[in-house]
Amino acid sequence: MAKSKTLFICRSCGHQEMKWLGRCPSCGEWNTFSETEGKSGSGKKEPELSFSIPLKAIEAHDGERYDTGIEEMNRVLGRGLMKGSSVLLGGEPGIGKSTLLLQAGASAKVTGRVLYVSGEESSGQIKSRAERLGIDNSNLEVFSSTDIGAVEKVLNKVKPVILIIDSIQTLQSRELGAVPGTVNQIKYCCHEIVAWCRERNASVFFAAHVTKEGSIAGPKIIEHMVDTVLHFESATSEIRVLRAVKNRHGSIDEIGLFVMDSNGLNQVTNPASLFMVQRDGDMPPGIAVAPVYEGSRILLVEIQALVVPAKGGFSRVYSDRIDTGKVARIAAVLEKHGGLRYSDQDIYVNVAGGIRLKEVGIDLPLAMALYSARTDLSIPSGTSIAGELSLAGEVRPVQHLKRRIKAAREMGFTSVLGPAALREGDSPEESWIRISSIREGIQKVFGS
Ligand code: TYD
Ligand code: MG
C-alpha cells in the first residue's frame, strides 16, 4: 500500500516542500503554503490536493518509455511503451495478437520482470509457441489462469514492470458469476488490472478478440479505461497492419507493418513496395499507382477499378479498402467533369495488398483508375499519381508532395502526375506533371 506523508504546496506556483515556509523559495510569494496529504509509494502519484494550481506553474512530464524491441510497435505506440500505461490490442481470432505480445514481451528492454498471463493457452502451449518463435528470454514469466483473484496474487509476488493479459475476455472474477467475457466481468477485470498497474507504474497489454465486423464488441466497453487502443488487422494472408485508434501517448497516424511467417511476425522495415504488384509489360486498364502518405512513411499502392454495366439498372459501389462514399463522389466528379457515365454502372474498387486507404491524396489516382476502367485505356506504366479532388473537379495540393515524388522515383516511376498548386511552405525541386483540374489530368494521361 502507498504510504501517506505530509506535503506543503505553494498555492501560487505549485512548488512542494516537506515543511511549512512563510515565503515560497520558488516564486517569492508570502503565506501561500498549504498542508496536504501526499501519497508516495509509486513515486509517480500526484499528491491529493484540495485546491487548484495555476496551469502555468505545473511542470509537464512526458513519462519514460520502454523500448519494446519491436520498432514497428514502438512507432505505433509513440516512441515506445509509456511506463504505467495500458494498451488494448484488438484483432480477429487468429490474426497474431498472442504472437505479437509474446514477441514484444520477450524483446522488451526492461530491467524488471515481464509477466505473460494466458487464459487461453497452457504454459506448455506457450512454451512451444515461444520455441517456434526462437524466444529464450529469462525476463519473461508465464502464468496460465482465468481467475482474476489468482492473477492478482501472482502480480503481488512477481511485481512485473510489463504485464500481458491474453485475453481480457478469458479473465473472470468468481464473485461476478461463472461466465467469463460478460460486460461486467470484462469491465471489472480490466479495472482491477489497470488500477494495479497505475499504482505501481507498470505497463499492461490486454489482448482482445474482435468480431469480423471490426468492432471490439466486448472490449469496446473498456476502450475508455485504457490509454491506448491498437487494432491488428490483416491486409493479405501474410501482411499484418498495426494501427492506433486511440493514443494518449502518441499520434494515431502511424502504422506498423509485419509479415507473418513460420517464425512469427517479422517487421517490414522498407515498406515502399509492399503493396505493389510485380508485372511485366503494359498495365491493364483500371489500374493506377499512388504514392500514399501513411503515418510518417510513403507507400506505393496500386488502386484497381472495374466498371461494368449495372445489374438491375442502378449503380452500386463495391469497395472495402476505400470508403464507398469517396468512390461514389469521385465517380460523380468524373461524370460531371470527365464526360463519362457511371450512374448506370457497377463500380468495384480494390487496393492491391489489401491495405485500407483513407488519405485525401488518393482522390486523383482513384479518379484515373475509374476513368481507365470505364474507357479501357491503360494508364502508362511508369506513371504514378497523387492529388486531392474537389467537387468542382479541381486538383488540390497534398501533404508531403516532395517525399511522394521522391519515393515514386526511387521505385522506378519516371513520371508523377500531381497538383500544380503547392501547400504553404512546400517547394519541391523535383519535376512532376502539374495539373490543376481533372480534365487536364485526363488529357495529360490519356491524351483525349
Ligand atoms: P495467434 O497469435 O495465436 O493469433 P491470435 O492470438 O490473434 O488469435 O496466431 C495464430 C495464427 O498465426 C495461427 O493461424 C498460426 C499463425 N502463426 C504463424 O503463421 N507463424 C507463427 O510463428 C505463429 C506463432 C503463428
Ligand atoms: Mg491468442
Image (cartoon, grey):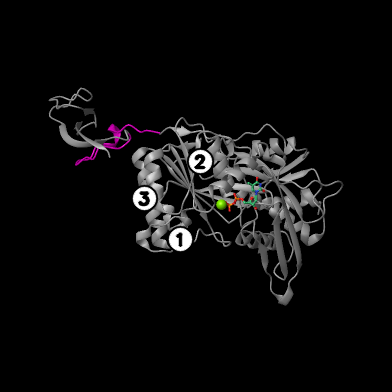
Image point (43%, 46%), residue name: 227
Whether residue 25 is in magenta: the answer is no
Residue named by callout 2: 77
Q: Secondary structure at mark 2?
A: helix
* Residue 94, image x, y percentages: 61, 54
* Residue 67, image x, y percentages: 51, 33
Residue named by callout 1: 181
Quarter holding residue 57: top left
Residue 192, numbered circle: 3
Question: Which of pointers 2 and 1 lies earlier in the amino acid sequence?
Answer: 2
Q: Nearer the viewer, residue 372 or 389?
A: 372
Above or below: residue 110 compared with residue 397: above
Q: Are marks 2 and 3 in contact (CB under 8 Å)?
A: no
For badge 1, the amino acid type reads Gly
Inter-mark Cα distance, 1 to 3:
15 Å
For badge 3, the amino acid type reads Glu
Image point (46%, 53%), residue name: 168
Quarter holding residue 187: bottom left
Q: Secondary structure at mark 1?
A: loop
- Residue segment shown in magenta: 44-62
* Residue 177, image x, y percentages: 38, 64
